[in-house]
Amino acid sequence: MVEQEKIQRTLRLLLLLSGRKTYTISELAEMLSTTNRTIYRYLETFREVGFQVERINGRYSIDKVSPRYKELSSLLYFSPEEAYVLSRALDIIDDGNPVKQQLVEKLYSLYEARNVAATIVKKANSEIVTNLVDAISSGMQVILKDYHSSNSNSIGDRLVEPFGFTYNFLSVWCYDPVSGLNKVFKTSRVGSVIITGSKWLHQKHHKMGHLDHFRVAGYQTQRVCIELNLRAANLLKEEYPLAETALIQNNDGSYVYEADVSNFEGVGRFVLGLPQDVKVVGSQDFIDFLAEKVMWQSQCVKSAAKVDGF
């Protein structure tokens, strides 16, 4: 097992150094969960087998003219025909499907992010995603033009610093200088992306949070546990495919879903939509949250009835 981990670490380091970005020794050590000394040993090994390791201003990469790099790149290259077949195959898989996510992660680890995006993202959204990939790779601020925000119920432009994606490029993590917060923006709600040419100014504040199975982002998690009948379990898997990874079937045919969520909003909407099919097992905080929602909905119904004259 130790030997396998060494091989995996070596391959990952090689792929990182073969990409478009450059890294410091400390960054590589942190990404690979190892020490600076170990990274130096790997770099020396790469040089010994024929790779030309470049160091510019303390940042490392593999020289693209290296003969060994050309051999490596031939393994990572998709021909136009291969890319077309792959994109057609991935396109029929639902964006939230965990199998698609696993395939994307493997492609991402082997292939340049821009090419992965262009291969798997739907054509209508590909330019937006590839522009975001380019901005992240070069550390640039962008303007998200005509962003359709559900939270503010408005359409507007956002100046942000994009720094990472959620699964399958569905959303992008960005730092918002105006609010001073890291936020998640759905790529499908972006009209277009303008790369400003200005470098990141707040990189030390960039931090990805937790994205739960209901596609809600946050930095603190809360545990929920619900029991579902077959109908509810099927709907959960259809609407939120990644939730299937936390589903366990009981002997009586019912199911239990237990997982950490970013907040109760996403899972709460699902539960309140199926009151006869879902039973909340825990936590008490979640039960209290649902009770408040039910009370609020009841008050809204009464208010509407008064307006209508009932």
Image (tube, rainbow, N blue to C red):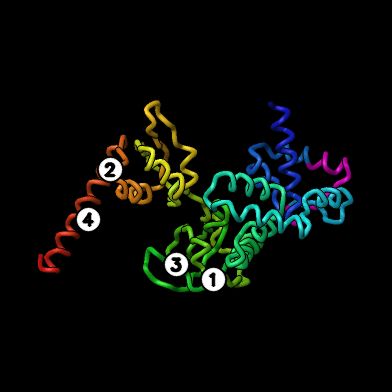
- Tell me which label, 2 or 4, sits earlier in the chain: 2
Q: Which residue is mark 4?
A: 297
| Residue identified by numbered label 1 | 143
> Residue under circle 3?
178
Labels 3, 2: front one: 2
Quadrant occupied by the C terminus: bottom left
**What's the magenta region?**
43-59
Amino acid carrying mark 2 in the image: Gln
Kind of residue at disc 3: Val
N-terminal of the two: label 3 or label 4?
A: 3
Q: Quadrant of the N terminus?
A: top right
Q: Residue at image x 54%, y 47%? A: 97
Residues tagged 1 and 2 counted as in contact (Cβ below 8 A): no
**Where is residue 242 shown, x and y percent of the image?**
49, 44
The span from disc 1 to disc 2 (Cα, nearest Å) is 45 Å
Q: In front: mark 1 or mark 3?
A: 1
